[in-house]
Image (cartoon, rainbow, N blue to C red):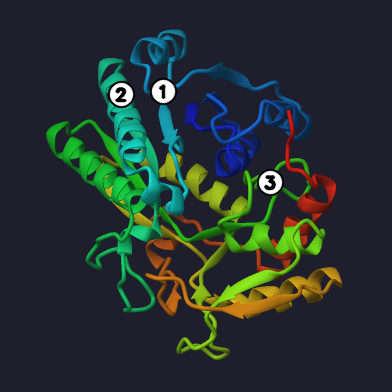
Amino acid sequence: MKVLLTGGTGFIGSHTYVELINEGFEPIIVDNYYNSSPLVLERLEKITGVKPIFYNINICNKDAFKQVFEENEIDCVIHFAGYKAVGESVQIPLAYYNNNLNSTLVLCELMQEYNVHNLVFSSSATVYGTNTTMPLTENLPTGCTNPYGWTKYMIEQILQDLCIANKDFSVALLRYFNPVGAHASGLIGESPKGIPNNLMPYITQVASGKLAKLRVFGNDYSTHDGTGKRDFIHVVDLARAHVAACKFLNKQKGCEVFNIGTGKGYTVLDLVQSFEKANGLSIPYEIVERRPGDIAECYADASKAKKLLHWEAKLDIVDMCKDAWNWQKNNPEGLVN
């Protein structure tokens, strides 16, 4: 079974490549290195023993992207490609709407043209907006607070409409919670450019001395220690969810939505203390003002994925902390070309 990965050299895409190989699939990567490095391909070959099939293409370029469909009989697509920084999306919203929506439209047009009907979409729990009902279930109302989130929301709607119009399509919308960790080999992991937007890479960069201390945004939330609570999931578990979704799509038509999380919430300080304990390190931090739009807690009800995808998270917070630090200490500057 040939699986096309758009954005396949990115953080989640690269880990999914490894899990697809482990399960006997034939993944094909398309990426333009907007938020990744060519060195990822060497690392993937080292981990799997398989030289990746790779196309350096911006998928918004339909004529160039068509080559991939011409040269490969694709069975399923996993669509990771897209701009993904919340703060940046507020600053340059048109770039986010143009890139994320247009790339998806081009992909779907080519899938229709070449009779490829199975699609797994990399969505996000951000589509739940400011819902305060916990745990979050797939049938809750959706809405967003930033342009990045709205692109996920709009793409979900596009794909749902496509499934109604074309009964051959089978789509899984995977709403991620907070992916962290890295491959146990330490060869691939999260490599943010500049100061990290996400908590775990910020912690690992403080641990390495690259950043002086962690800023904790607020300690007066209604949680056990006052800091925000989130559902952190190991990136390898997340990657395995995509493999499960590919298998699921072979058996059904239409569009299904799945939360992909652990179903457990950890506060910021829970994660800091777990990291310190797992790795024998100390993480200095300071409490600063809340960020606008942050909510007290956000965690998943992942029971639907367990029931229909036969998937659930296996790796715990200790695994997440150990693997994240193993990646950081072995790649202090990330992957530098």
Which residue in the rendered view is the most extreme toward the left?
165
Q: Are marks 2 and 1 in contact (CB under 8 Å)?
A: yes
Q: Which residue is mark 1?
A: 59
| Relative side of 317 to 251, left or right | right
Q: Quadrant of residue 227?
A: bottom right
Report the Cα–Cα distance between label 2 and label 1: 7 Å
Q: Secondary structure at mark 1?
A: loop
Mark 2 and mark 1 lie on one chain; the one further toward the N terminus is 1
- The alpha-carbon separation of the residues under discs 2 and 3 comes to 29 Å
Which quadrant, please, contains the C terminus? Answer: top right
- Where is residue 300 shown, x and y percent of the image? 43, 69
> For residue 189, which numbered disc appears in the image?
3
Q: Residue reaching furthest right? A: 280
Identify the residue under disc 2: 106
Mark 1 surroundings: few (<14), some (14-19) or many (≥20) residues within 10 A: many
Residue 98 percent location from the top left of the image: 31, 33
**Amino acid beneath label 2:** Val
Mark 3 and mark 1 lie on one chain; the one further toward the N terminus is 1
**Could you tell me how many numbered marks the image carries?**
3
